[in-house]
Image (tube, rainbow, N blue to C red):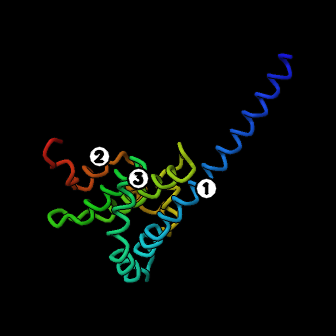
């Protein structure tokens, strides 16, 4: 009968949906394990007393991570890591601390989107501000995480190197 057939199709759809959820969870877990060393190294860099350890780890991780992120990272992760990497390594225009913090927080949020919290609504302030004592004591700190990026760059007098690139 039609009802029995529809019920059977519904059960199969539920099984398929369950398998898809399990696959997505495994994929997110695997991606997180690939992102984890870089996230930890960046965390060390930004933690008082951990910058030397973070610098050492970053040097070891970068070549392999750049290959991984370029091939398996989401567009948002690739773009945010590119901006972080190019922005902080630009010898002609080292960014102010506010820019570096923002680039790192943008990368963290992009990873968060990629590993299973798509469409996350948290801001850099929420994701990254927890690392800063007295975050609300200086407007410049708040601006680093809440201003649109282009406005932030202008306010601190920094031109992103990708703005100077050919074709932009």
Q: Where is residue 45 in the image (x, y as percent from the top left)?
A: 40, 74
Res. 143 visible in picture: no
* Position above or below: 16 against 68: above
Residue drawn at x 46%, y 67% as measured from the top left: 39
Residue drawn at x 18%, y 42% as measured from the top left: 168
Q: Where is residue 67 in the image (x, y as percent from the top left)?
A: 34, 61
Residue to which mark 2 is pinned: 150
Residue to which mark 3 is pinned: 77
First reached walking from the N terminus: tag 3 or tag 1: 1
- Distance between the alpha carbons at the discs numbered 3 and 1: 19 Å
Front disc: 2 or 1: 1
| Image quadrant assignment for residue 118 | top right
First reached walking from the N terminus: tag 3 or tag 2: 3
Front disc: 3 or 1: 1
Secondary structure, mark 3, is helix
- Distance between the alpha carbons at the discs numbered 3 and 2: 19 Å
Residue to which mark 1 is pinned: 26
Q: Where is residue 72 in the image (x, y as percent from the top left)?
A: 42, 54
147 or 112, nearer to the observer: 112
Front disc: 3 or 2: 3
């Amino acid at each position: 009968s039609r009802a029995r057939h529809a019920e059977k199709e519904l059960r199969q759809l539920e099984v398929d949906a369950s398998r898809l959820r399990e696959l997505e969870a495994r994929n997110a877990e695997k991606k997180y394990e690939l992102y984890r060393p870089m996230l930890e190294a960046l965390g060390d860099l930004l933690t008082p007393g951990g910058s030397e350890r973070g610098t050492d780890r970053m040097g070891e991780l970068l070549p392999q991570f750049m290959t991984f992120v370029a091939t398996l990272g989401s567009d948002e992760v690739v773009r945010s890591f590119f901006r972080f990497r190019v922005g902080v390594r630009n010898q002609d225009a080292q960014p102010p601390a506010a820019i570096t913090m923002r680039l790192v927080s943008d990368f963290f949020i992009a990873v968060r989107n990629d590993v299973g919290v798509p469409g996350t609504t948290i801001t850099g302030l929420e994701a990254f501000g927890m690392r800063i004592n007295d975050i609300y004591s200086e407007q410049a700190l708040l601006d680093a995480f809440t201003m649109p990026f282009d406005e932030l760059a202008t306010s601190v007098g920094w031109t992103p190197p990708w703005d100077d690139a050919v074709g932009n």
